[in-house]
Amino acid sequence: MDKLLDLWLASGIYNVTPGQVFMILIGLLLLFLAIRKNFEPLLLVPIGFGGIMANIPEAGLAMSAVENAIHLGGPEMLQTLSAALNINSADPAVVTHAYHAADAATHTAAVYAANDHGFNNGMLYNFYTVAIASGAAPLLIFMGVGAMTDFGPLLANPKTLFLGAAAQFGIFATVIGAVSLTTLGIMDFTIQDAAAIGIIGGADGPTAIYVASLLAPDLLGAIAVAAYSYMALVPMIQPPIMRALTTEAERKIAMVQLRHISKAEKIMFPIVLLILVALLLPDAAPLLGMFCFGNLMRECGVVDRLSDTAQNALINIVTIFLGLSVGSKLSADKFLDLQTLGILLLGVIAFGIGTACGVLMAKVMNKMAGGNSINPLIGSAGVSAVPMAARVSNKLGLEANSQNFLLMHAMGPNVAGVIGSAVAAGVMIKFVG
Amino acid sequence: MDNLMSEGLSLMVFGMGFVFVFLTLLVFATGFMSKLVTKFAPEAKPQPAKPQPAVAAAASPGNDELVAVMTAAVHQFRKH
């Protein structure tokens, strides 16, 4: 009978909290969106599943050794830990707080104390440490994206870089939004949180995760989910804004065919970009360095095997670990918060403002160039979201004029947006990191 | 609180300004690079141009007969 009681006391049904139930439902919702609605399935399937696993009661998959010890170890373990952390209280909340605030040496002492009593890091916690806390996974993904990117359309028309710059205004406008919410007393974001939330407007998953892991690790789960969900929603968010800001005549503008780009130019471009980053903004060097490296592997033509691995096998492997690690941040105590709602709301505003600024910038450039050479629809592609945003521009162009193929023209601002959001990320890390 | 707001504003002004400056420089650097490449390492135009004189040189002395003989020889060689 005692054994039966033990089994019951250790069961998930007995231990589950309402928060965990809710988070498991959110995980199931993400899986539903990915599988039935095809929302960024490559990321939302691992994220959703990781979120469910992280919320299995008593399994502690997303917790560190010490957190597991605090949760499962009982009073004696808490005494040992409070001794290791040099505090008097053995209250779980106080011990947890002291553990997070401890300096490196005390922190390590607590970890050893937990290990001695047989507590270890949860699997997802280990994935998170290796993949995201180290910065490795987003950077490897960026390398793969670089290996998949063709800078040809951008090199044929370098002015489209301005569109990629204008669309980054969404990022900074959102920072102001987050800061205002705090000033008004509705939310409680620090300037680091605000910067990490703003980067959602860059519409670039790996950049958002990289910045969030450096500036606001606590908000990482919400930020990553928001970034990837909105990337999937690009075909729904952008068209109304684009239609509202352009006239029928502007949407009909046909653009001249792009010039041919030589192989040497394509090889030189990542090197030029890297030199510029090295000279001006070393803080963007991890992101843009890996991006340029991937692109050089693609264009130089002598390491096809490496380029192939970077854009296929490696990016797939990294995506699995990245997704599960992001999922591990979907724990009830961090996600079920008013702040998450604020992040989701600010994220979609960031997206909308970025799109609008890109379109407006394209209109200005069109006016300056005589009024009949740049279709403003390509401006919206300045938010990254490669290649979805460019496809949206193409689709709206075809609606206005069935002979108007804007896809290649929109790819220019699209890849410029990737560079722009990485530069914006570098600036954020430099100023508030 | 006001401090936070001013921090946000300065982040916006400097951040946006820097993004524009960086990408403007990139526009110039890219244009410069493209010009250099098309000037010193032209690819598209001279490549078809170079083989043309070579073919012309080979064909110009009126060696139609020689070409025919060589073609036949190669043909014969491949058969075996």
Image (tube, helix red, strand yellow):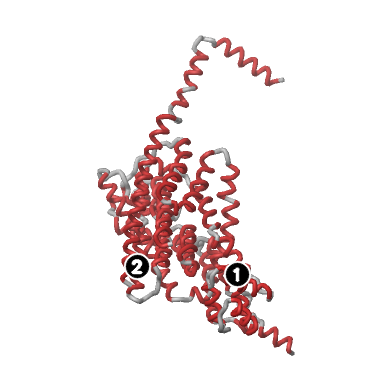
Expressed as whole percent of the image width and height from the top left, the position of residue A111 reads 62, 71
Which image quadrant: the C terminus of chain A?
bottom left
Give the amino acid type for the residue marked by disc 2 in the picture.
Gly
In front: A383, or A45?
A383
Q: In the image shown, does A419 or A397 lie closer to the viewer?
A: A419
Q: CA distance from mark 2 to mark 1?
A: 39 Å
At mark 2, the secondary structure is helix
Q: Chain of mark 1?
A: A
Task: Using the rendered image of the protein, determine whether residue A318 is visible from the camera's viewpoint.
Answer: yes
Q: Residue furthest bottom?
A: A1
Residue A139 horizontal side relative to residue A403, left or right: right
- Check the residue under mark 2 and report the chain it is in: A
A433 above or below A156? below
Circle on res. A177 = 2
> What residue is pinned by disc 1?
A108
Q: Is residue A70 visible?
A: no
- At 42% from the left and 73% from the top, the residue drawn is A341
Which one is nearer the viewer's eye here, A309 or B1?
Answer: B1
